Image: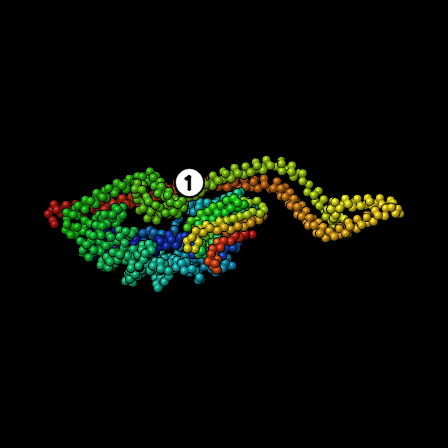
Amino acid sequence: MGLRLTIVLGALAAWSAAAGSAAPALAVPELGAARTHAPDPAGLPPVKIQDLHYGDVLFHFYGRDHFEALVRLSAYREQGHLAPHARDAELLRGGLYLSLGQHREAREIFERLLADTTTPAPVRDRAWFYLGKVQYASGLFDQSERALRAVSAGLPIELESERRLLIAQGLMYRGQFDAAIAELDGWQGPENWTAYARFNLGVALVRANFAERGHAVLEQVGLLQATDPELLALRDKANLALGFALLQADQPAPARAALDRVRLQGPQANKALLGAGWADAASGDYQQALVPWAELHGRDILDAAVQESYLAVPYAYMELAAVGQAVGYYEQAIAAYDAERVRLDESIASIRAGRLLGAVLGADRAARPDWFAQFIELPDAPESRYLYHLLADHEFQEGLKNYRSLEAMSRNLEGWATSLGAFSDMIETRRNAFAARIPEADRRLATVDIADINRRRDDLRARLEAALHDRDVTALATERERQWLSQLANVEAGLAAHAGNAGFDDAREKARLARGVMNWNLDAAWRMRKWQAERAMRELDAVVHDARTRRTGSVKARQDVPAAAAGLAVRVDAVSPRVSVLASRVKAAMTAQGRRLGDIAIVELEQQRSRLDEYSVQARYALATIYDRASAGEP
Amino acid sequence: MRAWIKAIGVPTIILLAMTAARAQAPAAPPATERSALDAEVQELRREVVDLNRDLFMLEEDLLFPASTQIAVFVSMDVGTFFDLDAVQIRIDDKEVSNYLYTTREREALLRGGVHRIWLGNMKAGEHEMVAFFTGRGTHGRDYKRGATQTIDKGVGAKYVELRISDRLRKLQPEFVVRVWE
């Protein structure tokens, strides 16, 4: 009786994992990992980039580096970039906080967007959707449903599918199976989403006591033709849930058929094999039951279903009146349970000695140092042997995620602490270099009298304008021409002293001709020289302006550079304590989180040990019963 | 089957099933309750994000002040005629960046992301920028093209976009340099 009770409880536990509470939960995990927690790129409205910095944020977002995307988005926003994409950027910021598990910040952003009456409808719809997701993740199902139902229309098909499933799952969490059925029944979406919806519908129907319809729907999912690993896993779950539901409904033959469809190497395989054996046993075919149970018996004893098979196999032999084999298998079971208990004790001791985190993180070293990176192979050491089983525990997973997040923060802060040291050195070096240049710069600045240059330029301009106004062709004469004009003036003055003397008439005529030629030439060159003079004046203006600007810049730099350096130094000094204080707090939280993980692991392993103790007692009891019967001469 | 059901009684089974079902921790349940430690981790994460934002800006202001800053971005649309491998940037005949793209980064570009490939400093005045794009063109052939642009650097930060797009009429990729004001 005791043995039977144990096995039935085991079967029920498997059933409940597959179908009972699983109703809302089972359909979520893959969605959770792949679609529910991380914001889906498809969730962003299509956008034509009008600000390169927003595009840079999207580059990191699409590259799945959500932390870097959030940091850049926040920084660019603070720097005044992103204005053309302000609302989209806010929507993305909320989504990024959501992906990092920062529900409060995400909710505040979505609520702010919704409170703004000028937010356009497509952005509002997405804000409602993400707000609903945040509330769902926080367990606020009523609010979540209201938010999700506030979406007017126009979500992309992926988001719309997720919205509908979130509503249905929220209803199932609240036990409102009829409403969930109404939400899911007849719904068609993309292939994967539809499969999840059908699975949830099947479970909701079973839970709402529409067993026959529920079984039919689960069977549809269990018969899916799929190659996608996610759908294959869902198909296994559907078959497992259906198998145990049919077993409960006392229909062992169809239950066996459903359980046979579960893949032999998938995560549900062991439970399915155990159930398949029970289906055969329920049909009275213990010979056949031995086939799946014997297969299970050869598998890793860490699994609860395998542990149960160590009792199920001799139980079947007993039913087949093969007492000798039954005794042999019970003895094997006792030995295996004892060995496993020793290993569990070793693991518990190792975890108590603080070696668990080393094993967890050691296995993680080769993986990308991402906050949510996945694990790779685990070594078979006492502290790590049960990690896969621990990782199946939600609380452990969440704690581990926190620990790894803290570890990433710690690395990040260590990096910044080093950089800040370099920043301080850099500012100091710049200050010194600047100070060293100041005397020479001051000396040079002192030699440049911008006021005098301006005065001379203005004088030149006035002379040019006067010459242009009076059409004074001689004002634009070349140096050579000026010499000639001077010589001619001297000649003309000398000739004037001999006025009336006919002996100078030839010379006077030549001077007159020379004057005429000079005037002609100067007049002919006037337009060209005027243009050249005006151009030269403009160039001079530009040079003077440039000199003035440089001088102003130099004087400003003389004052501003030390001030800017001081400002940067103040910022570095202000931020440094933040880094060190945060680093200490992160370290303290890591220690506490590590302790908590160890505690969770020990509780879990102690539960496993209790279960093994119980199995061991049952095996010994069965063995004793057999020996008693044998000594009493009973068959 | 019937035997072991009888053994513990049907109502017990159903009760146990329901109890187990409700008590079982779902694989990814919503976080209805947060412990003080969880709350502390959340708070730390928020503060670390804020701190990183401030440090990001401080680093930019210190290393690349606006007066000398130049940022070069790479963007891509469609990408039918060109599969990008790498981009090299030379300024005044000096190599300043040589970036090899991963598959994930290429996908990010195709989705509309814009990669800030280089952030640097430049004196005021004219400079020549040459960008070389290496990858695979149509029919998987190796493809390398260059684009040149004169950059007139003023007193403010300068942003340059290297845009790879498809020129449908010629069934060729097109490489355009655009200076943003």
Residue name at image x 18 percent, y 55 percent: A285
Residue A191 in sight from this viewpoint = yes
Q: Nearer the viewer, residue B64 or A45?
A: B64
A4 with respect to A430 (left or right):
left
Q: At 84% from the left edge and 44% from the top edge, which residue is drawn?
A: A494
Q: Looking at the image, can residue B84 be seen?
A: no
Most extreme residue toward the bottom is A186
How crowded is the residue under tag 1: few (<14 C-alpha within 10 Å), some, or many (20+)?
some
Q: x, y (%) of residue A113? A: 48, 56
Percent from the top left, x then y, of residue A224? 30, 59
Q: Nearer the viewer, residue A30 or A591?
A: A30
Say what secondary structure mark 1 lies in. helix
Residue at 25% in and 56% down: A260
Is residue A274 or residue A538 the one in the foreground?
A: A538
The residue tagged 1 is: A587
Quarter-of-image position of residue A152: bottom left
Find residue A345 and report its horizontal and vertical position in percent.
Answer: 28, 40
Res. A335 image quadrant: top left
Q: How many marks do you count on the picture?
A: 1
The colouring scheme, among rainbow, by chain, secondary structure or one colour, is rainbow
- Residue found at the far right of this picture: A500
Residue found at x 51% / y 53%: B176
Where is residue A592 shown, x and y percent of the image? 39, 41
Say which amino acid is labelled 1. Answer: Lys
